Image: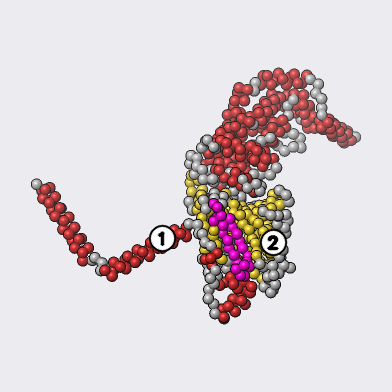
Amino acid sequence: MEEKKFDVKSIIGFVLIFGILVFMMYQNQPTPEELEAQKKAEQEQVEAEKKERQQNETLVTTSDDFTNTQALDSTQQVALQNKLGSFAYAATLPGEDITTVQTDVFELKFNRKGGHLAQVKLKNFVDYDSVPIYLVKENNSAFNIRFGTSDNRTYNTQELPFQPNVTKSGENTVVSMKFKASESAFIEYRYELKPNDYMIDFSIKSQGLSSVFNTSQAIELDWKQKSIRHAKSISYENRYTRLTYMHDDGRVDKLSQNGDDDEIIDDVEWLSYRQHFFSSILTSDDGSFNNVSITSQDLVEDEEIDTLFTKLYTSKMPLAFSGGELNKNLGLYYGPTDSKTLKQYDKGLQESIPFGWGIFGWINKALFIPLFGFLSGFLPYGIAIIVMTILVKILLSFVQYKQFLSQAKMKILKPELDAVREKYKDNKLKAQQETMAIQSRAGASPLSGCLPGLMQIPVFYALFMFFPTAFALRQKSFLWADDLSSFDSVLDLPFHIPFYGDHVSLFPILAAIAIFFYMKMTTGQQMATQPTQEGMPDMAKMMKYMIYFSPILMLIFFNNYASGLSLYYFISNLISIGIMLVIKNYIIDEEKVLAKIEVNKKKPKKQNKFQKKMAEMMEQAEQQKQAQQRGKKK
């Protein structure tokens, strides 16, 4: 009964509250004047939103939009004439300060002042913090042409007003920025943007200015740009951020990776301001640049303080006159430093990627890039790395077999070699001669185990260059790693450790543990069979140090490296341990090896020229030693 009373009271309360709200709404209803003001505000908001949508769409205008000049009094006209000379007309023309154009891959903003790009936003990519990738933003870039005129004036276009004009040419968008002396006399920056294309066709041309230019004074193009940080580790990103250029019919060179550097070069085909996984590239499409002055300044002195930019690049190059006018066809690439994307332009731009020099780069381009591209086409990226690692280890398994076979031979010969060293313990040179003779007759040598290992170095270094530059790995996750092209932090530290960083990466730890056990199993056996040669360093002692030094180096050095690289080394060493156990326990039969050694001992051993020379030198050294001993006895 009490519950029913409570329900009735609740209903009455709700009704009262509803009535009060209706009464208040009635008392506070707007007056006709207020309704009119509200309607006007809503219309203004609609117009503002419409204007904003139009700005975000491709702007298409015609030259008719800019034919009317602003009305100036005589004093203003004189002031402009004194300031801009032949180009005073440019300051009288209307135009938006910023012209925004969008394509499938870009959001570009062109600045009326200077006529060049005020912003380059890549629409399909974000940085480590999910912020859109900007290659040009907030005055980190400057593009200027410096030229002289017949009235002894010097102009810098980055300070001057250009008139924008955006049109369509089929599916392409054309942006024309003109610095005008009159309607028929001007300098024009022409940009042609194609759908789904990171390359912008860019030209610098003049019309009707042959009598205005001072052709005895060189025109200089000046391009500057600060590279904006995009990665978690600015120091790691900076390691792969370099000014790269192609010159002399296909030769590719770079400025310094660390510190400041500068160079003056000729016959330049393109310049790449590479920012690790993204690049800004200027190409010359109608003849190379000559007498180009380039500089690179490292902006990361302290990664805890310098967190915005990595390097400052500058390029200065003269532009030649053609019939008293400017006419230079160029290309501007703003996009990913991706081999597949760059290769489609047929300009050798993919050579700006540091695949490694000589044979190392060849291995990457001919083997690992196509192989990984094939595997990642149908496998998750982490699995593709594991499968590629397995294939590489199978390919190099014969190298491990040669190493273990050599170790087995040395292990079998050890008692005989120990007896020789004991017999000639007072004559180290004779002991060394006999040791070499036994090894030669048996077909065993310590070097035979080292030489196959040297064959792995090109593969090791090629992969060391492949993983940090593989654009396909960027922001691809695997297990706990959210980006295989960057470090896999499992613990953030509240402090920074020199050379290590402010985080703990797990894949380098696993790789360090795997390499420790692998070296313990292989190097331990080598130490047991490795004799100490007269006059030679104690190799057993050096190997002992390497067992501990290599994992520590792996742990520290790779803490900030691409987790994909550490994953490769971890899997690689696990597979190596497995191959070693199989070879040791199931393939190499020490009794058969001993029998083969005995057969080799009975065969006459023909020495090569090097072995003969070494034997002669050791024999001469032995004779000199004996002569000295006889001289002392006398």
Quick check: can you spot residue 133?
A: no
Q: Position of residue 516 (x, y in %)?
A: 58, 36
In the depicted structure, whether residue 88 falls above or below residue 516: below
Q: Nearer the viewer, residue 174 or 624?
A: 174
Tag 2 residue: 319
Residue at figure coordinates x 55%, y 43% from the top left: 472
Q: Position of residue 376 (x, y in %)?
A: 54, 37
Tag 1 residue: 49
Three-letter amino acid code at the position of disc 2: Leu
| Residue 611 shown left or right of residue 563 in the figure | right
The magenta stretch spans which residues? 168-192
Residue at figure coordinates x 53%, y 70% from the top left: 68
Question: For the residue carrying disc 1, how many other residues have a C-alpha within 10 Å: few (<14), some (14-19), or many (20+)?
Answer: few
Which comes before the other along the chain, label 1 or label 2?
Answer: 1
Three-letter amino acid code at the position of disc 1: Glu
Q: Nearer the viewer, residue 281 or 7?
A: 281
Magenta segment: does it hold 188?
yes
Residue at figure coordinates x 70%, y 54% from the top left: 287
In the picture, the quarter occupied by the C terminus is top right
**Disc 1 and disc 2: Cα gap in Å?**
44 Å
Residue lying at the far right of the rendered structure: 634
